[in-house]
Amino acid sequence: MLNRVLVIHNPVAGRRTKKRLDQFLTLLHQSEFEVRVWETTASGDARVQAANSSDIDIIIAAGGDGTVNEVLNGVYERETDQPLPALGFLPLGTANVLALELGLPSDPQQLFELLQAGRTYDIRPGIANGRRFLLMASVGVDARAVAAVTPPLKRKFGAFAYIIGAIQSMGSGAPTFHVTINGEELTAKTIILTRSQKYGGPFTLAEDAGLKTQIMQAVLFRSSGYIAAIRYGIGLALGRLKHHKDIVFLNVDEVEVTCEVPDPVQIDGDVASQLPLKVSIDVQPIRFLAP
């Protein structure tokens, strides 16, 4: 039984998300669980608090995919011999790709019932330049789009802000990335290294990947520019990316990416590093609450 619960909450504007959080906290406080609540005030708070959670059985990240990523990395930084706590997710963010990937409920009552049941899966995160991720790491248009999205733009347009960011990023040129996979050297204009099938919401990017599997996929987009982006966008929406001859899908364990110019690295929805990039799969799994 996972009795000691820590809820790490990233405040999100809007009455609807606050109401869902309050409902979930009410259910917890009325239950047999020992409950603590921590509200973040700055970037990195969730990571620090998770790192200091040596006496907690399960941490619920209430926020977006970025909040979960901070909690994930903080858990692995704990200075204790105790087993890692399990993780859970109350999706309150913009895209909530992780919730879609794992089939997590957004309804507080259903999440509470899932917590009571205590069903977890062992998930091996990816590691990108020392930072763990559950969804993906990327370079190219995908990462530049994330870098172009400012907090005001995200608040105003929600998930559409990333489309705006992608359009803006295409005007800055497209460098060529050099990729080393299983000793073979390849090139691409955008590279997504994913543990998740889903991308940008309900769309399937990598059919072989999946957090409940041990597979990470490298998706190499060989073309660039507005026309290529439109083709890729239509292919993603229709589930036909695998039919594009200028997209390469490879199952990988380790990947190295370099480029002649500096460029950002996107990790779970945030710009978190710079090239060069080295990605692998963690050998130590984390337990994650999921149906």
Image (cartoon, grey):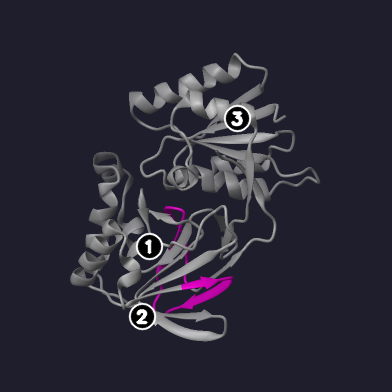
Alpha carbon separation for disc pair 3 and 1 = 34 Å
Q: Of 120 and 51, which appears nearest the observer?
A: 120
Q: Which residue lies at the image location 38% right of the left edge and 62% below the top edge?
A: 143
SS of the residue under disc 1: helix
Instruction: Name the amino acid, label 2.
Output: Thr
Residue 185 point in image, percent of width and height: 48, 86
Q: Quadrant of the N terminus?
A: top right
Which residue is under mark 2?
176
Residue 134 as seen in the image, left or right of residue 153? right
Q: Which residue lies at the image location 35% right of the left edge and 62% below the top edge?
A: 142
Nearer the observer: mark 3 or 2; the answer is: 3
Residue 86, picture quadrant: top right
Residue farthest to the top? 30
Residue 55 point in image, percent of width and height: 74, 33
Which residue is under mark 1?
143
Residue farthest to the bottom? 184
Residue 267 point in image, percent of width and height: 47, 57
Q: Earlier in the sequence, mark 1 or mark 2?
A: 1
SS of the residue under disc 2: loop
Looking at the picture, does residue 289 appear above or below residue 259? above
Alpha carbon separation for disc pair 1 and 2 = 14 Å
Which residue is under mark 3?
115
Q: Which residue lies at the image location 27% right of the left edge and 58% below the top edge?
A: 238
Q: Which residues are magenta?
A: 250-275
